[in-house]
Image (cartoon, grey):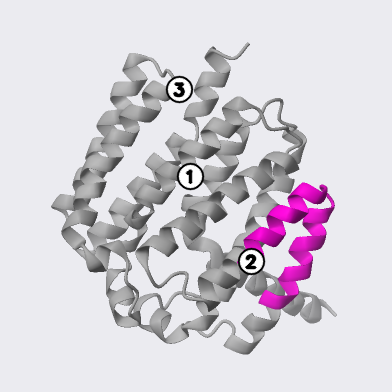
Amino acid sequence: MLSQALDSGRRIRRHIMTSFLFTKSDVLTVLIPITLSTFATAPHPDVTRVPDIIIWIWLHLLKHDIYNQMLDPEEDRKNKPHRPIPSGRINVQNAADVRWLLVPVCLIFSAMYGIKVLACSACLEALSIWYNEFGGDRTWLSKNLLTAIAYTILELGTTIVLGSSMDNILARAAAFNFVMFATTIHAQDFKDEEGDLLAGRRTLVTLFPTFARMSMTIGIPLWSLCLSRLWEVDIFCSLAFMAYGTIVGARFMVYRTASAHKQSCKLYSLWFALVHILPGYWRFFYST
């Protein structure tokens, strides 16, 4: 009896770890920034719903990531062998079964919070199909736009799950975050350049490497300045934020090895998370 309980516990832990590994790369770039953004921008957030928004985001990430990773396991076997499918933790057929099981799970869970959240969930599924089945990830323009749209829908969905309504601050934050993300998201493509070349993806990094690096070197500090002014951040915090953005942007031009790109992407993720806190600065100091 005890051995059966221990075996069951080990299987449960293995399934949890497998699910986490599917979404591991999105924790810093999606889960944490959106959670921060939701609290920073939402008027009168219900803090008791923190677990709700984390679960809602993570379920949709898991569904999309399984879908994306099961389509080309050979690419991951060469470039990301730690992922669940190439590492042998789960096979493609079982991953596909879980992915399709998650479709009604996400829709039903979303419906608990109302028709608007359900609509967000349905839109995310449509974007995921477009991205994975109809070549949305094959060209840099569609990849950047689809990802930015999905990111914005996630932000709007979590705001509603949190029990908040839309106001001017939230709308402004969502609009600027969309443009900022669409113009800097290729920061993540530098570390995947080799795999994208093998898979035939035409990202901005593979097509125009020099321009892509320059866009990071100029774009991140410029966004740091613009967003600091937009949210009326004090001079000390603005200078610190712009200095950090300048360092992050410069790394993409100066350091060009695969390991350096991974580190640059982590630093970009932190910058990206800080961007999502800035509306909270304005709401705290200036909102009446």
Q: Assess whether residue 137 is covered by the magenta stretch.
A: no
Q: Is residue 52 left or right of residue 141?
A: right
State the separation of the CA atoms marked 2 and 3.
Answer: 33 Å
Q: Is residue 112 left or right of residue 244?
A: right
Q: Confirm whether residue 263 shows in the render.
A: yes
- As displayed, is residue 25 above or below residue 166? below
The mark that comes first in sequence, 1 or 3, is 1
Mark 1 or mark 2: name the one nearer the start of the chain.
2
Return the residue at label 2.
126
- Mark 3 belongs to which amino acid? Trp
Query: Mark 3 sits on what residue?
Result: 231
Q: Which mark is residue 272?
A: none
Q: Residue at the location (54% across, 26% down)?
A: 280
Q: Main secondary structure of the magenta part?
A: helix
- The secondary element bearing badge 2 is classed as helix
- Quadrant holding the N terminus: bottom right
Image location (x, y in percent) of residue 136: 47, 70
Q: Nearer the viewer, residue 14 or 40?
A: 40
Q: Nearer the viewer, residue 136 or 242?
A: 136
Magenta range: 99-126
Numbered tag placed on residue 178 in the rendering: 1
User: Label 1 to label 3, Cα distance in Å?
Assistant: 16 Å
Counting residues from the N terminus, which is met first, the one under dot 2 or under dot 3? 2
**Is 114 one of the magenta-colored residues?**
yes
- The amino acid sitting under disc 1 is Phe
- Residue 17 is at least partly visible in this image: no
Q: Position of residue 91 (x, y in %)?
A: 58, 87
> Residue 137: horizontal and vertical position, in percent?
44, 70
